[in-house]
Image (cartoon, rainbow, N blue to C red):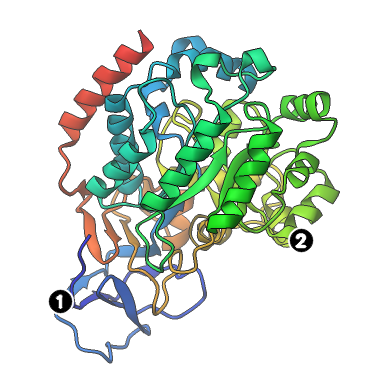
Amino acid sequence: MTTSTHTIWIKQPLAVFTANDEDAGGGILIQEGKIIELVAKGATPQADYDEIYDAAESVLLPGLINIHHHFYQTLTRAYPPALNKRLFPWLQTLYPVWAGLTPDSIRSSSILAMAELMLSGCTTASDHHYVFPDGLENAIDIQFAAAQEMDMRVYLTRGSMSLGEEQGGLPPQTTVQLEEEILQDSERLIQSYHQPEEGAMQRLALAPCSPFSVSESLMKASAQMAEQYDVRLHTHLAETEDENRFCLEHFGMRPVDYLEHCGWMSNRVWLAHGIYFSDEEVKRLGHAGVGICHCPSSNMILASGICRGIELEQAGCPVGIGVDGSASNDHSNLMAEVRQALLIQRLRYQADEISHLDVLRWVTKGSAACLGRNDIGEIAVGKQADLALFKLDELRFSGAGDPLAALILCGAEKADRVMVQGRWRVIDGRLQGIDLAELMGEHHHLAMQLQN
């Protein structure tokens, strides 16, 4: 993506959420892909500008950040044989289907998932891809190419499964790889794609799938490689009580103890779900600075439970939000997921203990912290110009008093404008440069081939 010295004033938004309490009521100035000035409410910019975008009808947010997804699962939404199942049998039903993934289906599903995310206000997406059947060894390369085509900021993960049914795991043997193969490819991908510099459009993390699908030696080797190359680590953990029982039966310890045993108790780690933690485990995770991705819709559909978001954050864990896979959600709309996060947290905490501002913070600054990034997730001078603007011009918003609260409580789901690194990617609710009808036709055809 190229940037320009052209300076834009996003002027006088209807409301603004900066994620840091700074005053940007008069808007912001953007140049060369970064925010260069915050304008106080009622004021005009101190710096010169070339263009004005009148945001008087728009609620301005930092670009939303999705920190857990499985792009390929858009191909198996509402898959009939997997409906109404708990996590383990749900996975056992879908693993053989996913074993049929092809390069074309990975490309199409990745582009479609990113399109859906971007239209919902998302500017940075992390994906956890861990299925590498024969012929799909370059799945992550395909995803990076798709992200470049979309002009979307990504933090992709090299997932893995090495513990098949023959070794006591859940996945069929056709979906697992040898550890040596996994580690060699992980090193190749880091060296080929990971951009450590500020403002990076693409980064890579290492992401063994889960305690029930990878070996202890792979968990430990991944942690050592992450330390060697200074990249992050990601996995599913403590999602269900079944997982707790699996870890106790196979490793003689609970998931958090196993995590620490494998060298993963550090602030370079973020975990998906994190539901079944004891009070003592919450404190340990917080002390280590381990990030937690709250995936409310997936957890509700699979009846997994409710993340202890407030307690984890208070203990010191960064907390972010992810839509999770489109086979367990079954959508990729991040703004809709923010509302779901508020609602499900209200089943655990009192109404005055968590607000719309908390979940907005989680999906912006909190998600950025889980990814170890301090250049995105906020509206502040020097941050990347990743922005989402929403209009309150639908029936659902009529009569709303507080614009920020209305986004969440009234159910905003489609951004009017989205900017990534200073470049408009969504204008008037339309994704730029992508023929959605053509994309959906291709994607649906590939989905039906996979499912049949």
Question: In terms of image quadrants, where is residue 55?
Answer: bottom left
Q: Residue at image x 82%, y 44%? A: 278
Q: Position of residue 88 (x, y in %)?
A: 64, 19
Element type at marker 1? strand
**159 or 294: nearer the viewer:** 159
Q: Residue at image x 20%, y 78%? A: 7
The residue beneath circle 2 is 287
Q: Position of residue 348 (x, y in %)?
A: 71, 44
Amino acid at circle 1: Glu
Q: Residue at image x 38%, y 28%? A: 74
Q: Residues within 10 Å of mark 1 (few under 14, many from 20)?
A: some
Question: In terms of image quadrants, where is residue 388?
Answer: bottom left
Q: Let me know if residue 100 appears in the view.
A: yes
Q: Position of residue 251 (x, y in %)?
A: 80, 30
Q: Residue at image x 27%, y 21%? A: 444
The tag earlier along the polypeptide, 2 or 1, is 1
Question: How many dots with numbers?
Answer: 2
Q: Is residue 119 above or below residue 71?
A: below
Q: Let me know if residue 411 appears in the view.
A: no
Comparing labels 2 and 1, the label whose residue is closer to the camera? 2
**106 or 351: nearer the viewer:** 106
**334 or 110: nearer the viewer:** 110
Asked if residue 392 lies left or right of residue 293, the reply is left
Q: Is residue 290 above or below residue 41?
A: above
Q: Is residue 81 above or below residue 425?
A: above
The residue beneath circle 1 is 51
Quarter placement of the N terminus: bottom left
**101 or 8: nearer the viewer:** 101
Amino acid at circle 2: His
Quarter placement of the C terminus: top left
Q: From mark 2 to mark 1, how far is it between C-alphas? A: 46 Å
Q: Residues within 10 Å of mark 2 (few under 14, many from 20)?
A: some
